[in-house]
Image (spheres, rainbow, N blue to C red):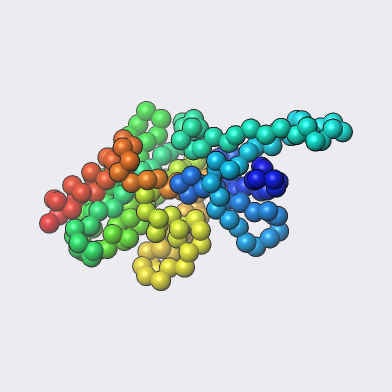
Amino acid sequence: MQFKQNKVWIAVRSNNQLILDGHKALMKYQLNQSHQYWVNVSNLREIDDSSTAGPNKENTTTKKYKSLTDTKKDDSAIHIYTDGACSGNPGPAGIGVVMIYKDRKKEISRYIGIATNNIAELEAIRTGLTAITNHRLPIVVYTDSQYAFGLLTKGWKAKQNQELVQEVRKLSKKFTHLQYVKVKGHAGHEYNERADRLAVEAVEKGV
């Protein structure tokens, strides 16, 4: 793709969907460089290779890249919406998970005892992934936790909750096609709001 005046490399999943953190994509100027950058997708343009086939390469055209919210939902994937809730931090905690596959939906609401909010967020993801038996199906996991997203996609070092983090990372590797998507919490998305409600209800029932 093109970033400002430079041709760059953008990280994508196996289904060619950008790896996004909110509205930022993961970019490298060269494939062999170690450092990578998170850049706003509004600054990226997709290079139309068909216009570079001839000798007149200066006619290369670009088109604006659409953000994740503009792309069509992958109906072949299992979509897992996760959230954790905590009354106090640490305090009584619960998890909520909404799983969507084609026209089927499954909900999980569970009290997990005294825990931190970060533990609840990770436990919700672990619970959703554990419920999947076919590891070859494409999976999309949605979380509003920057902490969980960073640990599972950006290689952040786990200073706390190391055992749980390693368990989720190990579980993630079992899937052939797994994508984590960072979403904004309490932004009105039906299934994210439902996962939040399930987590809160679990806390209320458990206390």
Viewer-proximal residue among 178 and 1: 1
Identity of the residue drawn at 55% across and 41% down:
42
Quadrant in which the N terminus is drawn: top right
In this image, 204 relative to 110: left or right?
A: left
Q: Residue 206, how many percent across, how many down?
A: 15, 54
In this image, 172 relative to 194: left or right?
A: right
Viewer-proximal residue among 133 and 185: 185
Identity of the residue drawn at 71% across and 32% down:
61
In this image, 57 relative to 141: left or right?
A: right
Q: Residue 29, how many percent across, how many down?
A: 68, 53
- Vertical order, 75 against 5 (above or below): above
Instruction: Specify whether residue 14 is in view.
Output: no
Instruction: Specify whether residue 197 is in view.
Output: yes
Viewer-proximal residue among 205 and 58: 58
Identity of the residue drawn at 13% across and 50% down:
205
Residue 190 image-quadrant placement: top left
